Every structure is written in structure tokens, then in C-alpha cells.
Image (cartoon, helix red, strand yellow):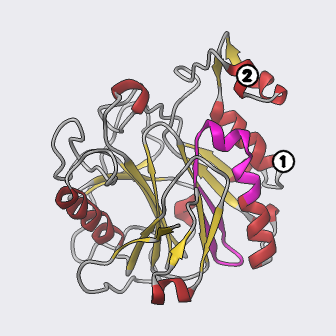
């Protein structure tokens, strides 16, 4: 059993319920254009992040995919590392998490011990009050406002799933093991069971992760089920973005309600951490919060 990760340094900051942008006080985020990803909404203040255009239309949701740019961590974690378990100093990680929490103006920034499994943790109000022990998980769901759910990544997908009608959000850590276990389908089943969400109402976004250009699995015949075969783009290379889209559609989402960032982390280590490209490295964050 592990204790829920909660980063609550400083006084809580109230979130404005009327904006679909990151709350910025009197200072606006200047947009920046990064070649190849210009359709995404790139913003920068103390740290650099982007938002999905479709998700940003929902005023009940604040979200962001934070790059490695900014932050205090030294090489090889240089930038905005969010993980305590990769060898970075706890002091640097604390400051990096404070920067993310401040950027989204969250009362709570919550993360769990990710283990490449299929467990789903539903966050209720009593978890915030007691900070009780919970099992490891790779997905979080909540209907509580001002609670930022954070997924840590370095090639795995961060998948945000949002119900604009029921005001429920999930944030999912989905690597190839998560795809094999269909963690996305399990999350949607929990949203249906616990919150009466209808899959056809859900919207989803798949963030930067290992792209089909670099997702080589030489042992795929041993680790992937047969139904992954149509997603092999060339010998030993797979489109895991398409796998996730297929699993979301199979669970009931409309194809037009799914966004994909299209950024390969192994190709873009200038922006994101990549375990495959760098080995010893940090973890970047995908954050989603109801407001």
C-alpha cells in the first residue's frame, strides 16, 4: 500500500469557474508557436505547456500538458521533472510541483504510484480530508472541483477523459502495458458505474508519447495480443495512438470527440522527457482539473 501523493504547499488558491484557460491573474500567457504542433494551444509563463483545442472549449475543465521547459532540476532531469523516484532531489521536485500547482491554481495536486497496471482510483472528498493509504494505480477519476489530477510520463501516454454533462474527469497513464490491459476501457466502465456517465458524451485527448515512428517492439509476438496486428505500421513498429483511439471508440466514444497531440516524445526530447531516447531522465506532467 502507498500513500496518495498530494502536493499542498502554501495556501489554497481559488479557481475561477468562468474560464477555460489557465487562471492567470493580471498576467496573460503569451502564446508560442512550436513548428509541427501549431494547432495546439501553446502557452508560457514560468513554465511551458499546451492545451488541446477541443478540451479547451469546456469551461468546467482546466488542463495542461507541461513540457520539461522551466523548472529547477539539473541534468539529466533538466527542467520541470515531476518524479521523486528517478534520482532527482526532492527539493527540486517540490519546487517544480509548486510551479505546476500555481499554474493551474489548484487547491490540491494529486498523483499516485504508477505501476503500468490497470487499476483505477476514484477520488472522493474523504480522500482529501484523510490522505489515507491506497493501492498503486494508473488512472484517477473525480467529480470534485479544484483537484488537479497529475499523470507523470516519459514515453507513455497521458489520456484525459472528460464528461461535460456530468462534470467528471479522468486522467490516465497508458503505456503499451496499459493498452494490452485496455486500461482506457476500464476507466470508462468506472465512469459509467460510479458517475452514470454515457460514453457517447465523453471527450478525450491523447498527449505526447511514443509515436509510430519510434514505437519499435521486436518481441511484439510475445507481448501484444493478435488484435494489435492491424496497428503495425512497418515491421516491429506500432501506432499506439491508433490503438488507444480504437479502444476509446470500442468503449463508446465518438471518433470525432478524440484529440491526439501527434507529438512523439522520443523525437522531441527538446520538449519532453523520453526514457527510450535518454534512459536516465525525468518525467513530465499531464494535468486535468474541474473548476
User: What span is in magenta?
Assistant: 160-186
Q: For this rendering, which residue is in front, 100 or 156?
A: 156
Looking at the rendered structure, the secondary structure element under dot 1 is helix
Horizontal side of residue 209 vs 167, given as left or right: left
Camera-near label (2 vs 1) is 2
**Is residue 153 within the magenta segment?**
no
Taking the spot 29% from the left edge, 32% from the top edge, the residue there is 270
Q: Residues within 10 Å of mark 1 (few under 14, many from 20)?
A: some
Q: For this rendering, which residue is in front, 57 or 248?
A: 248
Vertically, is 23 above or below 115?
A: below
Q: Which mark is residue 183?
A: none
Residue 80 rendering spot, x and y as whole percentages? 26, 50
Vertically, is 216 above or below 258?
A: above
Q: Residues within 10 Å of mark 2 (few under 14, many from 20)?
A: few
Looking at the rendered structure, the secondary structure element under dot 2 is helix
Q: Earlier in the sequence, mark 2 or mark 1?
A: 2
> Which quarter of the picture shows residue 46?
bottom left
User: Residue beneath label 1, please?
Assistant: 250
Vertically, is 147 above or below 272?
A: below
Residue 281 rendering spot, x and y as whole percentages? 31, 37
Vertically, is 166 above or below 49?
A: below
Taking the spot 81% from the left edge, 62% from the top edge, the residue there is 200
> Which quarter of the picture shows residue 191?
bottom right
Taking the spot 66% from the left edge, 72% from the top edge, the residue there is 164
Residue 290 rendering spot, x and y as whole percentages? 52, 76
Horizontal side of residue 69 vs 284, given as left or right: left
Residue 37 rendering spot, x and y as whole percentages? 44, 37
Q: For this rendering, which residue is in front, 256 or 3?
A: 3
Q: Which mark is residue 222?
A: 2
Q: For this rendering, which residue is in front, 80 or 162?
A: 80
Q: CA distance from mark 2 to mark 1?
A: 24 Å
Amino acid at each position: 500500500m502507498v500513500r496518495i501523493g498530494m502536493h499542498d504547499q502554501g495556501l489554497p488558491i481559488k479557481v475561477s469557474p468562468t474560464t477555460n484557460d489557465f487562471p492567470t491573474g493580471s498576467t496573460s500567457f503569451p502564446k508560442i508557436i512550436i513548428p509541427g504542433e501549431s494547432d495546439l494551444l501553446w502557452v508560457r509563463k514560468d513554465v511551458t505547456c499546451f492545451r488541446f483545442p477541443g478540451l479547451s472549449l469546456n469551461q468546467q475543465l482546466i488542463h495542461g500538458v507541461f513540457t520539461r521547459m522551466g523548472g529547477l532540476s539539473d541534468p539529466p532531469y533538466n527542467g520541470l521533472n515531476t518524479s521523486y523516484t528517478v534520482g532527482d532531489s526532492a527539493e527540486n521536485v517540490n519546487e517544480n510541483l509548486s510551479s505546476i500547482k500555481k499554474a493551474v491554481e489548484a487547491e490540491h495536486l494529486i498523483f499516485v504510484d504508477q505501476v503500468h497496471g490497470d487499476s483505477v482510483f476514484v477520488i472522493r472528498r474523504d480522500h482529501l480530508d484523510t490522505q489515507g493509504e491506497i493501492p498503486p494505480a494508473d488512472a484517477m477519476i473525480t467529480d470534485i472541483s479544484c483537484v488537479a489530477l497529475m499523470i507523470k510520463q516519459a514515453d507513455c501516454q497521458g489520456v484525459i477523459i472528460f464528461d461535460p454533462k456530468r462534470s467528471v474527469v479522468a486522467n490516465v497513464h497508458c503505456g503499451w502495458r496499459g493498452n494490452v490491459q485496455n486500461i482506457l476501457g476500464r476507466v470508462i466502465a468506472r465512469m459509467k458505474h460510479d458517475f452514470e456517465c454515457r460514453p457517447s458524451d465523453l471527450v478525450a485527448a491523447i498527449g505526447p508519447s511514443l509515436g509510430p515512428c519510434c514505437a519499435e517492439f521486436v518481441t511484439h509476438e510475445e507481448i501484444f495480443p493478435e488484435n494489435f496486428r492491424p496497428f503495425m505500421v512497418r515491421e516491429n513498429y506500432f501506432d499506439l495512438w491508433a490503438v488507444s483511439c480504437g479502444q476509446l471508440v470500442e468503449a463508446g466514444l465518438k471518433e470525432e470527440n478524440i484529440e491526439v497531440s501527434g507529438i512523439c516524445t522520443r523525437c522531441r526530447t527538446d520538449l519532453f522527457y523520453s526514457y527510450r531516447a535518454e534512459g536516465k531522465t525525468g518525467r513530465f506532467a499531464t494535468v486535468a482539473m474541474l473548476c
